[in-house]
Amino acid sequence: MTSSIHSTPHLPSPLPPGEPLPHRKVIRSWLIPLSQRTTLRALFLLALDYALLAAALSATVLLASPWLKLLCGLAAGFVIGRLFIIGHDGCHQSLTPHRRLNKWLGRIAFLPSLTAYSLWDVGHNVVHHGFTNLKGVDFVWAPLTPEEYQALSPRQRFMQRIYRSGWAPGLYYIVEIWWRRMFFPSKSSMGTQRSIFTWDCVLISSFGLLWLAAITTAALVTQQSLALLIATGFIVPLLFWFSMIGFVVYVHHTHTKVSWHGDRATWAKAQPFVSTTVHLTFSFHIGALMHHIMEHTAHHVDMSIPLYRLKEAQKTLEELLPGRIIIQAFSWRWYFQTARSCKLYDLTRNCWTDFAGNSTSTPRHAVT
């Protein structure tokens, strides 16, 4: 089979080992044909996922078995994740060619995950994508240094141990991201206050209250346990969603081969849009079920590529930059080994450590 890079005239030959990475603008130019967006396809995906969510939530009411209700609640949480990924594209202006439409489709897709569009825009698009893995700026799953960890109170250390155990990605996201930065955040958490932040929080709060009201009405009409329906039709989907997003963001940027940086100059020289992201691969087409968000290097190289073209974009990058992109086959063994290894990050030695400060990854020389 002929490789795609040989059939596309504008693409160069694969980068030889030892050669420095081209400038980001050059790499992005390779992906320009893949940044074309289709409104009809975006609307179809949004409608499909909302139909799946409605079916899963309806099943939590219509099915008699509590175990089947629970299963459907978990399925609803997964679909909320799919909708969030669509909203994520809308927020990046990569969903359709129309800027205003993207904003409204993004807000609509974000509703079931209770995500405030404007707050996500600032925290994710501006901060995370603008300064990926730069300590003191990028706050998502930012590891503490051994010195920072030692300065914590016993309670704070306990929470760090829970967050970094591998068992509580959802708890981390609920407390450190959603509650503190995505739901009526204080000015100290965001650095600024805008009226649009408040209105977007009011929007998702109203959606959440309407969701609860619908469940309450369904319980009264069908004479079922209100507590059971709220648990399986509201709490379980949201808990699954929070765990899903916490897990996905963690594995995107946590790996023994991924570096964090303490100063902006070193960070910029390290080409962070390639070196700080992981392409996590799955069996059974699970990546496709998550709208290809795991093809994450391509997304960080060019945020304008829509979710339905990320797979091809990732393939192109991996063919043209052999050995430069972190590709990891997912397994639970790998995941929990990573959780054991990646507790803290020593910026002096440029390596991951355990909570005692012992290195758990090979120290890397700083980029000069």
Image: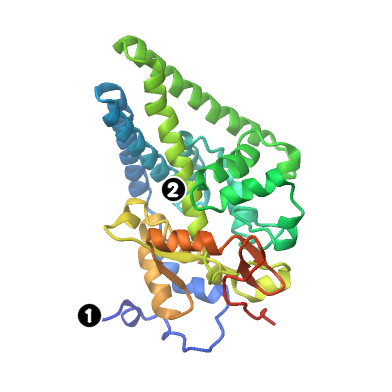
Height in image: 136 above or below 16? above
Q: Is residue 167 left or right of residue 57?
A: right
Q: Tell me the residue at 59%/53% (across/down).
A: 125
**Image coords of residue 38 (percent x, y):** 37, 52
Between residue 359 and residue 221, name the one nearer to us.
Answer: 359
SS assignment at label 1: loop
> How many labels were placed on the picture?
2
| Residue positioned 51% across, 54% down in the render | 249
Quarter of the picture containing the C terminus is bottom right
The image quadrant that residue 109 belongs to is: top left
In the picture provided, is 27 more to the left or to the right than 134? left
Q: CA distance from mark 2 to mark 1?
A: 32 Å
Give residue 116's position: percent from left, percent from top. Answer: 56, 37
- With respect to residue 132, does 76 lie above or below? above
Q: Residues within 10 Å of mark 1 (few under 14, many from 20)?
A: few
Tell me residue 363's x, y (percent): 62, 77
Q: Amino acid at mark 1?
A: Met
The circle on residue 1 is 1
Q: In terms of depth relative to the viewer, which is nearer, 62 or 196?
A: 62
Q: Is residue 165 left or right of residue 49?
A: right
211 shown above or below 184: above
Image height check: is 337 above or below 181?
below
**Image check: 120 left or right of 236?**
right
Tag 2–tag 1 contact (CB < 8 Å)? no
Q: Residues within 10 Å of mark 2 (few under 14, many from 20)?
A: many
Q: Tell me if I can see residue 90 in this picture.
A: no
Quadrant in the picture for residue 56: top left
> Which mark, by number, is residue 85?
2
Q: Position of residue 253 (x, y in %)?
A: 53, 61
Q: Quadrant of the N terminus?
A: bottom left
- Looking at the picture, which amino acid does disc 2 mark? Ile
Q: Secondary structure at mark 2?
A: helix
